[in-house]
Amino acid sequence: MAGFDQLLIQENVYILQAFLVMFVALLMNLFQKKIFRTLSKKAESTRNKLDDAFLLSIPRPLSAIIWITGIAFTSEIIQNATGAVILEAFIPLRDAVIIAALAWFLVLVIQHTEKNYLTAEKDIDPTTLDAISKLARISIFITAALMILQTLGFSISGVLAFGGVGGIAVGFAAKDLLSNFFGGLFIYMDRPFKVGDWVRSPDREIEGVVEKIGWRVTLIRTFDKRPLYIPNGVFSQIAVENPSRMQNRRIKETIGIRYDDADKMQMITKQVEEMLKGHPEIDTGKTLMVNFNSFAPSSLDFFIYTFTKTTNWEKYHAIKEDILLKVLKIVDNNGAEPAFPTSTIHLADGGIFRNIDTNLKNLPA
């Protein structure tokens, strides 16, 4: 009886071994999570952004590697004990998962690095950083996919040959998709605008703030807060204006005074020009003109042409309001008045009306 029990234990020892392997895998997973959690907290106090990205990216892919390795060892133990041939499939599957986990790790490193630089570095262009990040992730994905196919027994040369022949057909079928892709690539390279810029097009009804530049479409938030999705290929066919990159904002106004105040025009324009040159928000390094401009139907007009230092839209209007109020005060201080539309009718002498009255009386009844 004792010999039978010993034989039974020997036959079922593989179950104990498999359980032990999975238990060790569990302990290793818990241990590595605790270790990297502690290291990542210490790394947060350093100025180096790469160590944070690496330490935050390791735990999850490493967990996948630990578990798939444990499962592969367990399947090997069970296969040796039972002779189940089907369990041999776990070996290439293990290799594929390890490759995928390494690719996952690199993608996480790129994502964390991008996030760290965007939050910490003010001089980093988010559009360029986003483009580099996307290109790196695409490269990792393609490389990992080809390695996994090779691991699973597929011929990479055959896949590449199919891609070369099929690429022509796909190119014709997905012409618009490729146009949008290369349109997005040109946006990243030429950088006519970036995320956060205010853009508009004189060729299309496009105006708003850029929120996201994707590989296929660009998201622009219009000023009435509606999202506008524009295919990137459109930007290669239209003119795009970027007011966010303007150096100054222009004030161009025409102001009219009465014809009765013609003798005061020269003094008014001179004082307005002096006021603009002394205004703290006016860029005197740019064109500044105040001149009598035209004889309008009901006014004598002079114009103001100058530029503000600020490009902020709200602040610009506050400055413009202040300048116009000061112009009105200068006009009033000189005893003049702003003109308003008037009409003057000059009547001829009464002889015309007497002739009309006589002719009316001579008409037959």
Image: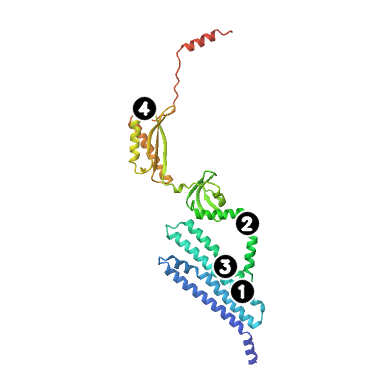
Colour theme = rainbow
- Residue 365, x across and y down, in percent: 59, 8
Which residue carries the number 4 mark?
262
The Cα atoms of the two marked residues, 2 and 1, are separated by 34 Å
Which residue carries the number 3 mark?
144
Residue 306, label in figure: none
- Give the mark toward the camera: 4 or 2: 2
- Residue 323, x across and y down, in percent: 37, 39
Q: Is residue 316 above or below residue 47?
A: above
Q: Residues within 10 Å of mark 3 (few under 14, many from 20)?
A: some
Q: The disc labelled 3 sits on which kind of residue?
A: Ala
Which secondary structure lies at badge 1?
helix
Which secondary structure lies at badge 4?
helix
Q: Earlier in the sequence, mark 2 or mark 1?
A: 1
Q: Quadrant of residue 264?
A: top left
Which residue carries the number 2 mark?
171
The Cα atoms of the two marked residues, 4 and 2, are separated by 71 Å
- Give the mark toward the camera: 2 or 1: 2
Q: Earlier in the sequence, mark 3 or mark 4?
A: 3
Which secondary structure lies at badge 2?
helix
The Cα atoms of the two marked residues, 1 and 4, are separated by 95 Å
